[in-house]
Amino acid sequence: MTMLGETTHDAMVLARSVGYYRNRRLILADVNLTIATGGRWVLFGPNGVGKSTLLEMIAMRTYPNVGGLRVFGDRTVAGSDPERRRTRIAIVSAAFGHNIGSGMNPLTVVASGIPRGTKDSSDEAYEKAYAMMRRLGIAYLTGKQWRNLSEGERTRVMISRALVSPADLLIFDEPTTGLDLGGRETVLRELSALASRGDERTMLLVTHQVEDIPAGFDHIAMMGRMMEHECMTYLDTHPRIYATLDGNTTPGTITFTGPLDEGLTDERLESMFGVPLHVERTGQRWRASHRLRFA
């Protein structure tokens, strides 16, 4: 596995030999990842390999059973008090949208990304929120209710909320899900601008589509299934885990970390998705297509 040479003292996220099991299933094994402060990273892989679980760990919503994970330099362990650190993370995900009251005004949702107690007054917070909504082309939603928004509109509202927040780590979990073509390109354009304009915040985008990687994101952590023989070797060195499992398992792991253009290759994508694929870069964007094989 390729690893980057960043020193650990400036790491926003540092995972070493992380494993996670639940309900007698091994979900993640031997996960190693270093995300330097200010980095623009993509967490990439097919469905079902543990991307969401790893994201929950980084967001301190769940904790590793094995290995060590540090976020903002602090180790994340069960029983710790992560609330202060959680305020430094802004997440855009469909799950967050389900917690918003059906009658809320989208402008209020965006403004809530600016914590109380900051130097911004209530009026200033709403002004910043409205300005961000205009930038993302959703100012017309002001005055509507959350229940009446489409899935794509909700996603763009939550992205606006993340962008106005003072968080140090911005996580975008499949941010284009539910968007039409115009909405997708608007969001990707804004994420690209954010990644490229010198913003010091660390950004992590989660996706399984190469077409949804914005320009400006330059490093990738690729996730896939651990090979069966690798899994058995891993379990031989972790007998406590093996004793808790129910039958065979093929956990997710990180198979590559490094520069984006070194990670996105035909061979890696074919191995990851199980079909012949060709990936190419056009300008600053990527696209993948089925690769025909001739006898």
Image (cartoon, grey):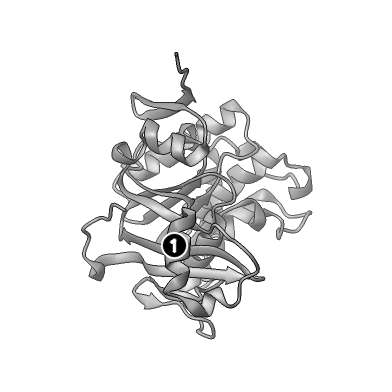
In the image, what residue occupies the spot 38% across and 39% down?
A: 193
In the image, what residue occupies the spot 66% across and 56% down?
A: 95
As drawn, 227 above or below 207: below
Residue 213 in view in this figure: no
Query: 227 or 169, which is in the foreground?
Result: 227
Query: 36 or 144, which is in the foreground?
Result: 36
In the rendered image, the residue lying farthest to the bottom is 79
Image quadrant where one finds the C terminus: top left
As drawn, 71 above or below 198: below
Residue 101, quarter of picture: bottom right
Q: Position of residue 58 (x, y in %)?
A: 47, 65
- Callout 1 crowding tier (Cα within 10 Å): few <14, some 14–19, many ≥20: many
Residue 31 in view in this figure: yes
Q: Is residue 103 left or right of residue 261?
A: right
Residue 169, quarter of picture: bottom left
Q: Position of residue 214 (x, y in %)?
A: 42, 37
Query: 285 or 28, which is in the foreground?
Result: 28
* Amino acid of disc 1: Ala
As drawn, 113 above or below 277: below
Q: Position of residue 162 (x, y in %)?
A: 51, 54
User: Mark 1 sits on what residue?
Assistant: 167
In the image, what residue occupies the spot 49% across and 78% down?
A: 239
In the rendered image, the residue lying farthest to the top is 295
Circle 1 — which element?
A: loop
In the image, what residue occupies the spot 61% across and 71% down?
A: 245
Query: 37 or 251, which is in the foreground?
Result: 251
**Number of on-image labels:** 1
Q: Position of residue 285 (x, y in %)?
A: 39, 29
